[in-house]
Amino acid sequence: MDSIVVFSPASVANVTCGFDVLGFCLDHVGDKIIVSKSNTPGVHIASVSGFRVPVNPKQNVASVAVEALLRDYPTSTGFEIEIEKGIKPGSGLGSSAASACGAVFAVNLLLGSPFSRRDLIKYALEGESLASGERHADNLAPVILGGFTLVRSIDEIDIIELPSPEDLIVSVVHPKIELKTSYARAILKKEVLLRDAVRQWANVGALVSALYTQDYRLLSRSLQDFVIEPTRSMLIPEFDALKHEAISSGALGFGISGSGPAVFALSQGQKTAQSVLQSMSKALDPLDLDFDCYISSINQQGVRVI
Ligand code: HSE
């Protein structure tokens, strides 16, 4: 095998109460990554399309992640990466995670799979850190492993795969403004009130329990964010109206997707998710602002060969 094509999905990180720890990925939105072996040693970005990302391999999350992998698996083979971006950078939908994960997943296969899927998270993390200026694996973990994931630690990488009910459907609205993760992280308060921390970790525990027991009412009560949303919501146009529309149309919960500006709502069943999406888009209609809408179930597979 000299060349491989993979689909690497978009993802929703944080999932309202789990800043930097919870995430899941979407079904059909994502990047297409083509990796080919080459006789020229090293890692090169052969082309980029869809949205603009750096072609300099030192500044591109995909090549930086692959270079990290190759430090642990030296080879004289070179690699050329073609990136067809389906996710806009700065969307809050895990654009950099998709490219980094897609590239290491493809290179690992071309090398005969010396690493497990879990091992790849460590390498993809090097790319992700370049994009956000800090290390967090809450987008990477679901893209590599599929499903709903919880990152217990990234010092010693420790990821827990969580179950998710089949009829849990996500509605996503993505206002087309760019919000850099590094900026959305820089504005966060560095200290959290103990009172808020208690409410937040109670919700994370409850959400995990709700996923195991398929308890939608508990899931709904848990989708609240006392720590991050109060600061970041002001970066998102019509945040309060979007939230109000989602909840009053029957969503179980609502939140900022990753660092935004995309927002998401979780619903039980396609029908509710569809009407939640319509209501949310109504909140943005009066603005002179382009936005995309997506509906998806929780992608259980993650990055895959196509
Ligand atoms: N947990 C990260 C953040 C996700 O919210 O900054 C970035 O997509």
Image (spheres, rainbow, N blue to C red):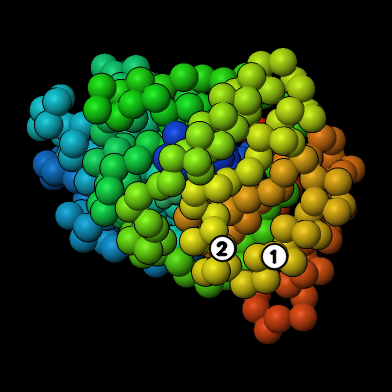
Residue 242 left/right relative to 306? right
Task: Report the disc number at residue 240.
Answer: 1
Res 133 → quadrant: bottom left
Residue 165 versus residue 196: which sits nearer the camera?
196
Residue at 71 percent across and 81 percent down: it is 287
Q: Residues within 10 Å of mark 1 (few under 14, many from 20)?
A: few
Q: Is residue 189 above or below residue 204?
A: below
Q: Quadrant of the N terminus?
A: top left
Q: Residue 49 is drawn in which quadrant?
A: bottom left
Q: Which residue is mark 2?
A: 233
Q: Secondary structure at mark 1?
A: helix
Reading the chain from its start, which is encountered first: label 1 or label 2? 2
Query: Looking at the picture, does residue 135 appear above or below residue 133?
Result: above
Q: Pick whichever, 45 or 263, lies toward us.
A: 263
- Contact, mark 1 vs mark 2 (Cβ under 8 Å): yes
Residue found 69% across the figure and 49% down from its top: 254
